[in-house]
Image: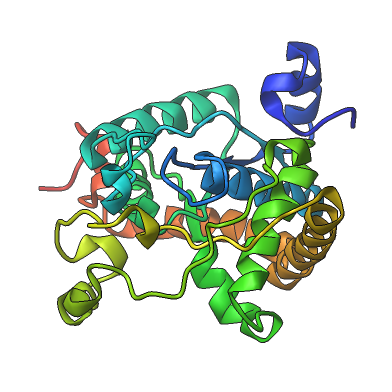
Amino acid sequence: MRTRILPKMLNSEIEQYLSRNDVIIVPVGTIELHGGFPVDSETVISEAFALRMAEACDGLILTGLPYFYAGATASGRGTVQVSVRQGIDYLGALARSLLRQGFKRQIYISFHGPALMTCSPMVRDFYDETGVPVLYMDLTTQIFRSAGDLFKSMDSFHAITTGAYQIMGRLEDVPLVTGYQHNKPQSVEKFNDIFQLATQSGSVGYYFGDLDDHMSTPDIPDEARRRGLADEGEELIGEIVNRMNMMHVVEQLRELEISQKDVMEKYPWTPAAYAKNPYNQNT
């Protein structure tokens, strides 16, 4: 294929793809304060993972989705903050469009922790409305679950960031910087007890009190160091995606949809079954 990035494809190329497959991976990003890296770092990481995942399971990816709920980084004036509700509604509209277009197996991914508050509600509401199971994969969760042994220090995360820019053909967007590395605790560290009572930013509202809270960044003094980080990060991304076994994931999505048809026939009052046939229900 010339490209797997849907916005770069011709309409005829998309239609040709849909004649044989129906998988699309949607990386959900953010624009936020990120230390010595560009503010779209977590968007680019998500897109790079999506591209490698699509290559592994013969899918396409829908890029260009950076404007969602950022969270505590709203302290930074470079952070674009969109409400959780606005993000859910927008992502749901995209999901419905993609389904109409023929993409039945949709996989939403993000490297941005708070993205689960946008993606997970959309995934559940979308199923009740359409009866089509779409999937959300939290990349940070996947990394710790299947590839924790690959991470020796925070430098591995920084390598992934740099490697993602290289995968997306944007390595020069990573600036040569120094002075963004710090070892002091986050300004909100004393509240970790309550932050950990739910998942990530879903526990309680707050903003970072210090712009250094997100994200400590290693010195990248020259192009050789940048290239070294990028090569290391690209290799890490490749190994993590390999461990995800994407062919199994997309096969499971297909099998889940088939099995759920029996469930909806057995229980016609479930929301998805009712939405499909509201006037023929057993009462």
- Residue 210 horizontal side relative to residue 9, left or right: left
Instruction: Classify residue 243 by image quadrant.
Output: bottom right
203 and 104: which is toward the camera: 203
Q: How many labels were placed on the picture?
A: 0
- Residue 100 horizontal side relative to residue 235, left or right: left
Q: Residue at (74%, 20%) from the top-left corner?
A: 8
Residue 178 % position (x, y): 62, 55
Q: Is residue 282 visible?
A: yes
- Residue furthest to the front in view is 179
Residue 155 % position (x, y): 65, 71
Q: Is residue 251 visible?
A: no
Q: Residue at (36%, 61%) from the top-left corner?
A: 213
- Residue furthest to the left in view is 283
- Residue furthest to the top in view is 11
Q: In the picture shown, does residue 84 fall above or below 268?
A: above
Q: Quadrant of the N terminus?
A: top right
Q: Residue at (38%, 58%) from the top-left corner?
A: 212
Residue 216 % position (x, y): 49, 63
Residue 105 % position (x, y): 58, 44
- Residue 181 horizontal side relative to residue 222, left or right: left
Q: In the picture shown, does residue 81 fall above or below 226?
A: above
Q: Residue at (72%, 68%) from the top-left corner?
A: 245
Picture colour scheme: rainbow
